[in-house]
Image (cartoon, rainbow, N blue to C red):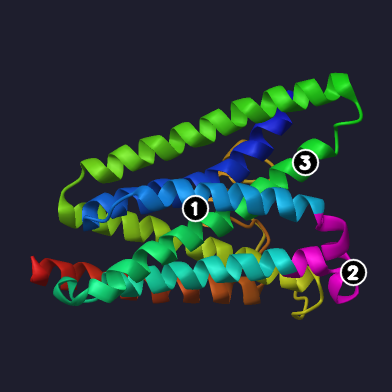
Amino acid sequence: MLLTSVVIVLREVLEASLLISVLSALSGVLGIHRRWIGWSLLFGLAGAVGYSFGVAAISDWFDGVGQEVTSAVMQLLIFLLLLMFTFLVAQDPGKQRFSGKLIVLVMAATVSLGVTREGFEILVYLYGFSADLPRFITILSGSVIGACIGISIGALIYYLVSALSYRLSLIAGLGLLALVAAGMLSQAVLLLIQADWLPSQFPLWDSSGWLPESSVTGQLLYALIGYEATPTALQASFYFGGLLLLLIVAVFAVRSREQAS
């Protein structure tokens, strides 16, 4: 029970922690102030609490699949925001008076949505055990451990990306964001399949025999790159298509920044 709660909360915290750490590191690389982080965290936490209180009503939307659809929409928005962020980074730095402010808004919106979604998952998970005090204390202890590990990994990634040279920081930061965004897109497709908004398909492959999703490694890879042991062709198409699109834009972003400097 303790280990399970550690892994579950670690997975949720790590997804948000990755977004915060990489975007924060890129803020420093791009010479953008980091005041947006505090406000985006507050909006995200408020959104998570509000979402938790309204989850019963939201679940009844769209003929009973409101929660799946809402979560999928949030992940699609995060993907689009990260794509917009990468595109804005590719703009000429000398002409970024307007786009510089837009980058801050995009980063803040991305973190707020990420914290709202992952925070909601954690709150719902904890609430499910709140009636059983002894079990709740065990779950809460594991959740705190998982959250601390996730935050620590995020801090480590922040310092690693920040410590690199200008060019390598851009490459590493935008590459990590591309992986996270592609994973979000794949998860959104899976949720829409579960809600019967997209057609159900047979798995394209099954890697659960050597790397189950329920394992610690599988859960970490799920958070980092959207790992799925039994993805459908639709999921794989969106994952690799989204990843390729972001990487292409990221290449242009790095080149434009190098030319400008």
- Three-letter amino acid code of the residue under disc 2: Gly
Q: Is residue 78 left or right of residue 206?
A: left
Residue contact at pointers 2 and 1, CB within 8 angstroms: no
Quadrant location of the C terminus in the rendered image: bottom left
Q: Residue drawn 77% across and 79% down?
A: 197
What is the CA distance from the residue labelled 2 to the residue labelled 1?
Answer: 30 Å
Residue position for label 1 = 40
- Nearer the observer, disc 1 or disc 3? 1
What element does badge 3 sit on?
helix
Q: 1 or 57, which lies in front? A: 57
Say left or right for 105 vs 27.
Answer: right
| Above or below for 120 versus 102 | above
Main SS of residues in magenta: helix
Q: Residue 125 bears which disc, if any?
A: 3
Graded by Cα atoms within 10 Å as few (under 14), some (14 to 19) or many (20 or more), the crowding at tag 3 reads some
CA distance separating discs 2 and 3: 20 Å
Q: Position of residue 22 (x, y in %)?
A: 38, 50
Secondary structure under tag 2 reads helix
Q: Position of residue 99 (x, y in %)?
A: 30, 74
Which residue bears the numbered disc 2?
64
Numbered disc in front, either 2 or 1: 1
Q: Is mark 1 on a helix, strand or loop?
A: helix
Mark 1 residue crowding within 10 angstroms, few (<14) / some (14–19) / many (20+): many
Mark 2–mark 3 contact, CB under 8 Å? no
Q: Is residue 129 magenta?
A: no
Can residue 14 be seen from the camera position used here?
A: yes
Q: Give the range drawn in magenta.
A: 54-69
Query: x and y percent of residue 82 in the render?
Result: 44, 67
Kindly indicate the quadrant of the structure image that contains residue 123.
top right
Q: Upstream in the sequence, badge 2 or badge 3? A: 2
Indicate the amino acid at tag 3. Tyr
Locate the N terminus and report the quarter of the image it occupies.
top right
